[in-house]
Image (spheres, rainbow, N blue to C red):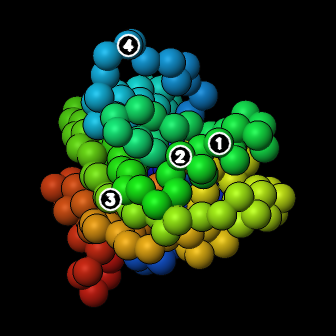
């Protein structure tokens, strides 16, 4: 079965390679990411991942299995997207300082005649940050293309005091859940031949 990653994220590509998936095709989906009001963060990421998968599966080969994901950061139920400016990034980081937030990732696998959507949630606690630390981190540019204005796989790791759940979920692809979902489609990552 040919895996098609419906994401342009270099981190997701790296994570797939890390668990031994090779030869997958990248077909970033171009979908409207607006959602109806009132959705929980879990409902939001599931809806968006399903929408991304549906957009790519239409043009996938018959033996293709499309993987789509969507990740958001939520603080007390309010979703923090990618910051639009350095000032917004600083505000987000100040809000996260010394508090616990949740990272949600929706995963959808869609293949011939079947689709499955699930989500993972990880609790992340930031240590208390000074204004100078926030300004220095924002000045690196790292927060600007990341939900919640931080990247745990980079300098943002210095902000995280505690994590409960799947570390890779915070990077945008919960690998343990993905492995279980792939198995349901006949893709066994731990078999000797990778099938």
Q: Residue at x 52, y 24 (%)?
A: 33
Say which of 169 and 107 sits in front.
169
Disc 4 versus disc 3: nearer the observer: 3
Q: Are marks 2 and 1 in contact (CB under 8 Å)?
A: yes
Could you tell me which secondary element the residue under label 1 belongs to?
Answer: helix
Q: Residue at x 60, y 64 (%)?
A: 129
User: Dot 4: within a 10 Å radius of its alpha carbon, few (fewer than 14), some, or many (20 or more) residues?
Assistant: few
Residue 95 sits above or below residue 56 on the image: below
Q: Quadrant of residue 191?
A: bottom left
Residue 136 sits above or below residue 148 on the image: below
User: Dot 1: within a 10 Å radius of its alpha carbon, few (fewer than 14), some, or many (20 or more) residues?
Assistant: some
**Mark positioned earlier in the residue sequence (4 or 2):** 4
Disc 3 versus disc 2: nearer the observer: 2
Residue under numbered circle 1? 91
Residue, far top: 36
**Mark positioned earlier in the residue sequence (1 or 3):** 1
Q: Quadrant of the C terminus?
A: bottom left
Q: Residue at x 34, y 35 (%)?
A: 77
C-alpha separation, residue under disc 1 versus residue under disc 4 = 23 Å
Say which of 172 and 91 sits in front.
91
**Mark positioned earlier in the residue sequence (4 or 3):** 4
Count up the numbered dots. Answer: 4
C-alpha separation, residue under disc 1 versus residue under disc 3 = 20 Å
Residue under numbered circle 3? 123
Percent x, y for residue 22? 50, 71
Could you tell me which secondary element the residue under label 2 belongs to?
Answer: helix
**Mark positioned earlier in the residue sequence (1 or 4):** 4
């Amino acid at each position: 079965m040919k895996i098609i990653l419906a994401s342009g994220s270099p981190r997701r590509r790296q994570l797939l390679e890390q668990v031994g998936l090779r030869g997958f095709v990248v077909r970033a989906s171009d979908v409207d990411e607006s959602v109806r009001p009132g959705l929980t963060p879990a409902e939001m990421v599931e809806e968006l991942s399903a929408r991304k998968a549906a957009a790519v599966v239409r043009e996938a080969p018959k033996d293709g299995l499309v993987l789509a994901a969507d990740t958001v950061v939520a603080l007390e139920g309010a979703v923090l997207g990618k910051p639009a400016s350095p000032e917004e990034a600083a505000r987000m980081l100040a809000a996260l300082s010394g508090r616990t937030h949740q990272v949600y990732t929706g995963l959808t696998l869609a293949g011939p005649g079947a689709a499955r959507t699930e989500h993972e949630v990880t609790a992340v606690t930031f240590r208390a940050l000074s204004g100078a630390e926030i300004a220095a981190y924002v000045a690196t540019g790292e927060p600007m293309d990341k939900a919640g204005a931080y990247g745990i796989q980079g300098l943002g790791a210095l902000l995280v005091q505690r994590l409960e759940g799947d570390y890779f979920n915070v990077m945008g692809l919960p690998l343990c859940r993905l492995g279980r979902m792939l198995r349901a489609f006949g893709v066994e990552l731990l078999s000797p031949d990778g099938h």
